Amino acid sequence: MEKPKVILNKKRDFSDVINATFSFITQEIKVYGKMLLYYAGIPVLAASILGAYFSGTELSTLFLKLETGSDYQLGLDYQLKVIGVNLLNAMVYVLLSGLSYAYLVTYKENGAGGFELQDVWSRFKKGIGTMILFAVIISIIAGVVIAVASLLVVLGTMFGSPVLSVVVGIPAALFLLCVFIYFLVTLSPAGMIIYDESPDFSNIFTRCFELIKGSWWQTFGIIFILGIIYSMVSSLFSIPVLVSSILEGIAYSSSPEVVASQSKSFAFVLTALISTLGGNAIYPILAIGCGIQYFNLKEKRENLDLLGRIEEISDSTI
């Protein structure tokens, strides 16, 4: 007997959202996975290779510095590489999120199996510009807040007593952390709003606050649980990297000149690549979860499922 298809426009409690997330992924894994592989496969692979190569090169550089007795300093070149890798990873996350949101909206409008991959791509292209702009603005605001907080802590350390710096710094850090979490949860429906409702940019923030009102804790719990699941599964992909690093350290302690002479560790680069690819492969869990919760929040506000059923009954009686 065929299982019923997942309905997106539906009110759900906390556990139902989690279950619907994995039910949807299981149901659509072939088409959804093919779509991600087709449109995001090359960018994800490129970002993973560059990140793994960078990590392997830096590890080999560290061993070389230890062998020669030189200081291992994180200079401007290193900082630029880190920024470049992080920007590339951020672009990958935006790509995966955008494709996931576009897929959900296309599924909602056409039903399971009622659309082609090109339909998802067409919808994705319409919203990706707004989504990138939104991500950039949020990143700039977060960066400014972090910079100001860091500056206050530094000034407190320079011109105040260490005790005063701790007394003021810790509560300030906790306050900023709480504010960050609050807005992170509140703005979590933004991607789905962009693709499903196509609002003016200024209305995205208003719409987020409107949907999340009265359901902040539920949304926080869903993101928290899915985040734990994502972290636990990602950590499994990180085990080979940990083992490789330990083996590299053991090899260095026994034959430092051999390890230090290597330009880069192939084993470490390979395991880092596997770890990065694994993390990117399961990242859509978070995007799909946020999408399911968006439809839940929207249904609570607008009762779209009920209106749809009334419309079906009206059509059948005509």
Image (tube, rainbow, N blue to C red):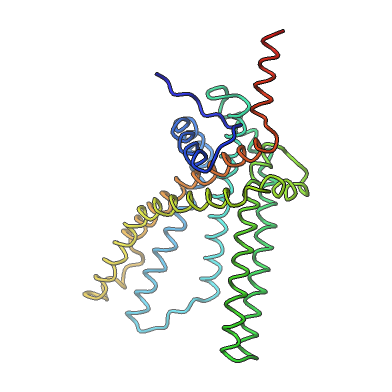
- In the rendered image, residue 131, in percent from the top left (x then y), is placed at 67, 47
User: Which residue does the image show at 60% across and 38% down from the upper left?
Assistant: 296
Query: Is 121 rendered above or below residue 318?
Result: below
Look at the image and tell me in which quarter the N terminus lies.
top left
Q: Nearer the viewer, residue 43 or 234?
A: 234
Residue at image coords 65%, 21%: 309
- Relative depth, front residue between 196 and 82: 196
The image quadrant of residue 157 is bottom right
Asked if residue 37 lies left or right of residue 248, the reply is right
Query: Foreground residue, 229 or 146?
Result: 229
Horizontally, is 255 left or right of 72 in the view?
left
Q: Position of residue 277 (x, y in %)?
A: 42, 49
Asked which quadrant contains residue 317, the reply is top right
Badge count: 0
Residue visible at 36% across and 64% down in the picture: 264
Q: Examine the rendered structure and indicate whether residue 15 appears above or below residue 110.
A: below
Return the x and y of residue 255 as percentages of the image width and height.
Answer: 23, 74
